[in-house]
Image (cartoon, rainbow, N blue to C red):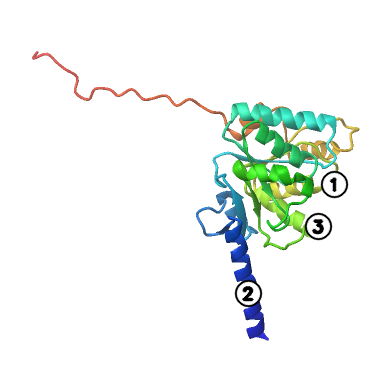
Amino acid sequence: VDALASKEAFAEAEKEILFLEKNKISCITINGNLYPNRLRNCDDAPIVLYYRGSCDLNSMRIISVVGTRNISEYGHAICTQFIHELSELVPDAVIVSGLAYGVDILSHKTALSNGLSTIAVLAHGLDRIYPAVHRKTAVEMINRGGLLTEFVSGTNPDRQNFIKRNRIVAGMSDAVVIVQSALKGGALITADIADSYGRDCLAFPGNINDEYSKGCNKLIRDNKAILVSSAEDVVSTLGWEHKEIKKEIQRELFPEMSEE
């Protein structure tokens, strides 16, 4: 039985290697140079990641932007304005999200339209895109960002995979920004994971009667997230200000002196 299982495992591994080579997908192990260093330091970091893209997973400034799938006009305005402002303040920032409906896909699209790199962390293998309607954006991201997953090809986007995906979203970034969220949902799970990793969590407040702002308001009330209202707030909190480096004046070591 062990010999048969071993033979099947080698066959599956060979099949996966051929799939990776054919689709130009990198297999990144936890001890490899390309593995996200921020994520490597997390206790439950995946041993292997599969990545197709052009962005450095160890870029200097990486931020995750997450939130509800049921984004409102208010949330839409916050998200687009925040990422637009961020692109002007920190043009080398990388936006990470989950390619889901609502805040996720808006974050990816807005990042691309503003010249920022953006990475989608997927809850399935790289042989598919879920939801399928976001395929065009996903393809565009390969050239300015990338697609990242811990799941082998053929893995379905099952519910439990999204929770596993959220720990990568939280772990590979410097901080997590929650745009809008109800009292329950993936964004709050990501916020809790980020907190357990010692990452900064920042949230935009909303109307106290808005169902999809109650999650953000609760995070702020419970001191689990820092209240922010602009990209400038986020940049200041994370210490991301671009400071001009002044060149030191080279002084003469041996100044000319008279004979006297």
Give percent across and percent down for residue 203.
74, 36
For the C terminus, the image quarter is: top left
> Who comes first in sequence, dot 2 or dot 1?
2
Mark 2 or mark 3: whose residue is earlier in sequence: 2
Give the residue at mark 2.
11
Q: Residues within 10 Å of mark 2 (few under 14, many from 20)?
A: few
Residue 74 vs residue 9: left or right? right
Q: Name the residue under label 1.
A: 184
Mark 3 residue element: helix
**Residue placed most toward the observer, 167 or 227:** 167
- Image coordinates of residue 219 in percent, x first then y, are 78, 40
Q: Circle 3 sits on which residue?
A: 159
What amino acid is found at the position of numbered circle 1 in the picture? Lys
Judge by depth and name the residue closer to the eye, 258 or 123: 123
Q: Where is residue 86 in the image (x, y as percent from the top left)?
A: 64, 30
Of the 4 image quadrants, the one containing the N terminus is bottom right
